[in-house]
Every structure is written in C-alpha cells, then in structure tokens.
Amino acid sequence: YGGENKEMMESFASLAVALLLAIILVYAVMAVLYESFFDPFVIMFSVPTAIIGIVLSLLLTGKHFSVVVFIGVIMLVGIVVANAIVLVDYLKQLRERGMERDAAIVEAGRVRLRPILMTALATILAMFPLALGIGEGGEMDAPLAIVVIGGLLVSTLITLVLVPVVYSIFDDWGQKLGRRRRMAADTVAEEGIGIEN
C-alpha cells in the first residue's frame, strides 16, 4: 500500500507540473499570436470555470480523483480555452472595425454562440461512449471522459457570461490607466514648457 501510494503521489506531482506547463504554454502561444498580454489573460479565465464542472461530474458519478482524471484535466486546458478564443477573437475584430465595446460584446456573443455550442457539443458527444465505460477495460478510461464532459459543459455555459464580463472590466481598467498616463505625460510636457519659458 505504501509503495502504491508513493507512486501515485509521484504521478500527481509530475502531472501537476504538466498541468502548469500546459497553462503557461497555452498563454504564451496566445500572447505571441495576439501580440498582447491582455486578450490571452481574459481568455484564460475560462480555465478555472472547468474546475466546477470537474468537481460536479466526479461527485455525481461517484468517481475518485485519479491519474486518469488528472490527464483529463490537462486535456481540458486546451479544449476549454478554444471556446473563449472563438468569442474574444471575434470581439477583437469588431472593436478593430470601430464598433463600440458593449455593442461588440453583444454582437460577438450572438454571432459566436452557435459555433461555440457546436464545438462543445461535438466534443461532449464524442466522449460520451468512452464515459459509459463499455467494453473490456472501459471503466479505466471512463473517468477521463466524464471529467472532460463535465468540465466542458459547465465551462461553456459559464464562459459565455464570464469572459465578456471580465473583458469589459479589464477594458475599463485599461482605459483608466491610459487616461492617467496621458494626464501624467501632459503634466510633464507643460512643466517642461514652463521651465523653458
């Protein structure tokens, strides 16, 4: 028992490192592609929402947290982020076209709702046979599918509300910070002109 427990703890430790690396790499790739730290940061808010679905799905099915479940959690990092990317990318396009922020959020939600639901539903339905644990050794892989289904289901529903809210909050903070910087720059410029006179 002691040896098995030690091996499980070592597996959890290495998988925790893998999960952390997955989150960092996903953020880094998005930061490079968006050429911004703001948009990827907003998108990453969809990852914690998957934890709610993971916990609920494990409680409802009576499964325990295991190495297979941990692998499912790592998979979810990439899958869950995809929904937020679809939403934020279109929102960014609308803002670049000159649309006002709140109108862009509503329009992005309306236009991207169907693609987000389609991709989530396709993944959930593809995982469903695996979640049933049918066949020889199927019960071993079932927790992975259960976690992916639960995490994706809850995350998709919460992401559609949470990501736009987080986007607008951070956008407000960014605008306030921009105004303060402009005011500080104007003050420095006025003081410089005063010194010259």
Image (cartoon, rainbow, N blue to C red):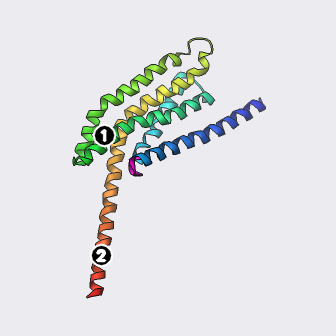
Residue located at (55% from left, 25% from top): 144
Q: At label 1, which amino acid type do we have?
A: Tyr
Residue located at (44% from left, 43% from top): 44
Toward which corner of the image does residue 196 lie, by quadrant? bottom left
Asked if residue 44 can be seen in this view, the reply is: yes
Of the two numbered discs 2 and 1 in the rendering, the one whose residue sits closer to the viewer: 1
Rendered image: mark on residue 90: 1
Q: CA distance from mark 2 to mark 1?
A: 37 Å
Mark 2 crowd level (few <14, some 14–19, many ≥20, 10 Å Cα): few
| Earlier-in-chain disc, 2 versus 1 | 1
**Does residue 104 appear left or right of residue 35 in this picture?**
left
Q: Is residue 37 magenta?
A: yes
Q: At label 2, which amino acid type do we have?
A: Thr
Mark 1 crowd level (few <14, some 14–19, many ≥20, 10 Å Cα): some
- Segment tinted magenta in the rendering: 34-40
Q: Secondary structure at mark 1?
A: helix
Q: Is residue 65 magenta?
A: no
Judging by the rendered image, the residue that carries numbered circle 2 is: 187
